[in-house]
Image (cartoon, rainbow, N blue to C red):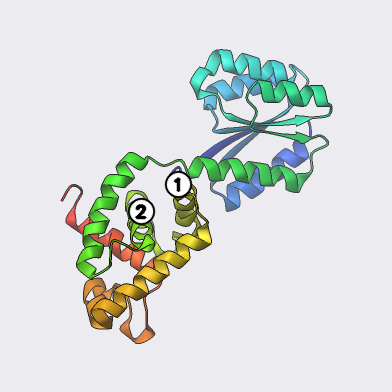
Amino acid sequence: MMERVDILCAMRDRRLGMAIRREMDDELHCSVRVVSRGDEAVRCACEMTPDIMVIDALLPGGDGLGVMDRLRAQLGGRMPRVIGGSMMPFSDEGLYRRGAKAVIRVPWNEEELKAAIQCQIDELRDAIDWRAAEQDSLRAQALLEGMGMSRGLKGFAYLSMAAALAYEQDMRLAAVGERLYRPIAARCGTTQQAVERSIRHAMESAMGASGAEGMYAFFGNTIDPTKGKPTNAQCICALAEKMKASGRGC
C-alpha cells in the first residue's frame, strides 16, 4: 500500500488550491503542488509524474482537455488519476473520454473536491500486491493454527490477510483498523464491519478452545492479561511481529 501521494492541482482558483495543499500536506501525508496555467501543468506533471491531478477544463495557457491529451502522449502509462473541473456538460464528456476518474462542477465546491481527492487517495493506498500478501498470509495461518484457531472460521482468513498486510507495511498498533479492513472487505466482497466482527469472533473462539492462558502464552508480553481479551489490532500486530521475528520464507 502506498504511503506518500503526490498531487498536482491545476486550477484557476489558486486560493482553493492552496487550501487543499495545506490540508492534504498536514493531515494526509501528501505532497501537493498548485499551478494556475495549462502549459505550467504539463511541465510540472512531466517533472513530478503525480499520482493524482486536479484540473480545470478551462485554463489560461491550455485548456484541461488539451492538457490531458498532451500528458497522455508524453506520460503514457504513468498518466495520473485525473479529477476534472467542468462548467458545461460537453466538457464532462470530454474529460471522461480522456480517462478522468471524476468530474466536478466548477466553481469548485471545496468539500466535494476534498471528498473526490480522498477517494482517489484511498484507492491508491489500497492498491496491494496480493500475490506477496497471500504468501505471507500462509505464514500467518500456520501461526493461527498453532494458537488453536479453526481454519473453518471466516475470521481465520481475514485475520491472516490482515496480519500479512500489517507485516508488509510494518504497521504499528495505531494504524491498524480501517486501512486494513477496507481492502480486505473489497477483495472478499464483504463489508469492513463484517471483517471486524469475523476477526473478533475467531479470536473469541480461539480463546474458548485454548483458554486465556493459551492465548497469553501465544502473545507473550504484547498484551496485558489483566485487561481481558486482546483487541483485533493487538492480535494483528502480534502476528505481524511474530512473522517478522521468524523471517520471510520461514
Kindly identify which residue carries mark 1: 187
Q: Secondary structure at mark 1?
A: helix
63 in relation to 82, above or below: above
Q: Position of residue 103 (x, y in %)?
A: 72, 33
146 in relation to 6, above or below: below
Kindly identify which residue carries mark 2: 161
Task: Tell me what residue is drawn at x 30 percent, y 79 percent.
Answer: 208
Amino acid type indicated by mark 1: Arg
Q: Quadrant of residue 68?
A: top right
Q: Residues within 10 Å of mark 1 (few under 14, many from 20)?
A: few
Task: Tell me what residue is drawn at x 59 percent, y 40 percent.
Answer: 120
Q: Residue furthest bottom?
A: 226
Q: Quadrant of residue 44?
A: top right
Q: State which mark lies toward you, 1 or 2.
A: 1
Side (left or right) of 46 relative to 142: right
Task: Tell me what residue is drawn at x 37 percent, y 40 percent.
Answer: 129
Mark yes or no: residue 11 visible: no
164 in relation to 54, above or below: below
Q: Position of residue 112 (x, y in %)?
A: 74, 45
Q: Quadrant of residue 109?
A: top right
Amino acid type indicated by mark 2: Met
Mark yes or no: residue 108 visible: yes
